[in-house]
Amino acid sequence: MPVLVLADIQLGNGPGTIVRYDRKSSNKIEVDLAEGAVLGPALAATETLPTALNMPEGTAIQRSGDAEVMGDIFTSFATAMLAGILMVFVVLVLLFSSFVIPVSILLSLPLSIGGAIGALLVTGNAISLPVIIGLLMLMGIVTKNAIMLVEFALQNKARGMSLAEAVIDAGHKRARPIVMTTIAMAAGMIPSALGIGEGGEFRAPMAIAVIGGLLLSTLLSLLFVPSLFGVIEGLRLRLGFGRISRPDGGSAVATPASFP
């Protein structure tokens, strides 16, 4: 009687469990970074390897673990930064009764980012969640310094000063409170920047980024913001933007309310 062969049984190795990610079969590969390596550059180098660029059909590399968390953090940071800038712009428009003047204030925000990144590069730290929190903090501080300069310059113009005189006087009289705020803030961050105490290595990058951003933004804001405001305000007056009509048929430039 002929024998019917149903299967060819052999011993071999295979997965003990079938793992799925986003409803697709997956195999997880976990690695530890070498000492001194940074997650972002390590991922970029891995994804440019010939094996990663020539994956078999139907397969792909999907980030997970810390790599996935890092992507989510940067996405959330971009959303938070955009929302914060829009909210600040709305408040400044209501304060100055103009859509043009707030531009000179918001353009000072990149000054703090450059200082923070420079401090991280000098100290050998990477951008992480604490650093992102520090950048959001810097955004508020730098905006506050710029508002002090622009608001005082507008008050000087309302008193009859020329645009150049108003800008120079604002930079001269508002330099002291701005510098004092920066020194106090930076001094308070020094213990955290040194990593003193339990969990200091987690807080240190944030403090370093804040100190670097404060120092550079304070130095450049006293030069950049008044100059930029003078240019934008001059163009605004020439083009007639942001004027409020008066009952007598004249016009008046919108200025923020004076503090007592």
Image (cartoon, rainbow, N blue to C red):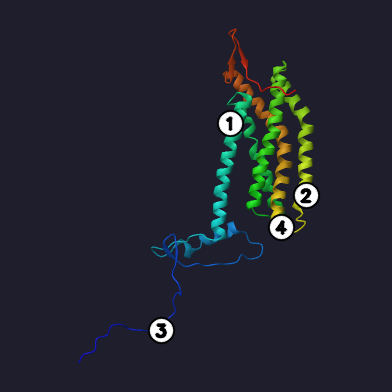
**Tag shown at residue 9:** none
Give neighbour class at mark 4: few <14, some 14-19, many 20+ (Cα, 10 Å). some
Please identify, in this view, whether the residue under mark 2 or under mark 1 is nearer the observer.
Answer: 1
Label 2 to label 1, Cα distance in Å? 34 Å
- For the point 54% across and 53% down, which residue is it? 71
Q: Secondary structure beneath disc 1?
A: helix
Q: Secondary structure beneath disc 4?
A: helix
- Relative to residue 65, is residue 118 drawn left or right? right
Q: Position of residue 196 (x, y in %)?
A: 77, 56
Label 3 to label 2, Cα distance in Å? 63 Å
The answer to which of marks 4 and 2 sits earlier in the sequence is 2
Give neighbour class at mark 1: few <14, some 14-19, many 20+ (Cα, 10 Å). few
Q: Amino acid at mark 2?
A: Ile
> In the image as oriented, which residue stretches furthest toward the top?
248
Q: Which residue is mark 4?
A: 201
Q: Which residue is mark 2?
A: 190
Q: Which residue is mark 1?
A: 90
Q: Amino acid at mark 3?
A: Leu
The answer to whether residue 106 is seen in the rendering is yes
Q: Which residue is mark 3?
A: 11
Examine the image and state in which quarter residue 65 appears. Answer: bottom right
Q: Position of residue 89 (x, y in %)?
A: 59, 32
Q: Amino acid at mark 1?
A: Val
Label 4 to label 1, Cα distance in Å? 37 Å
Label 1 to label 3, Cα distance in Å? 70 Å
Q: Amino acid at mark 4?
A: Glu
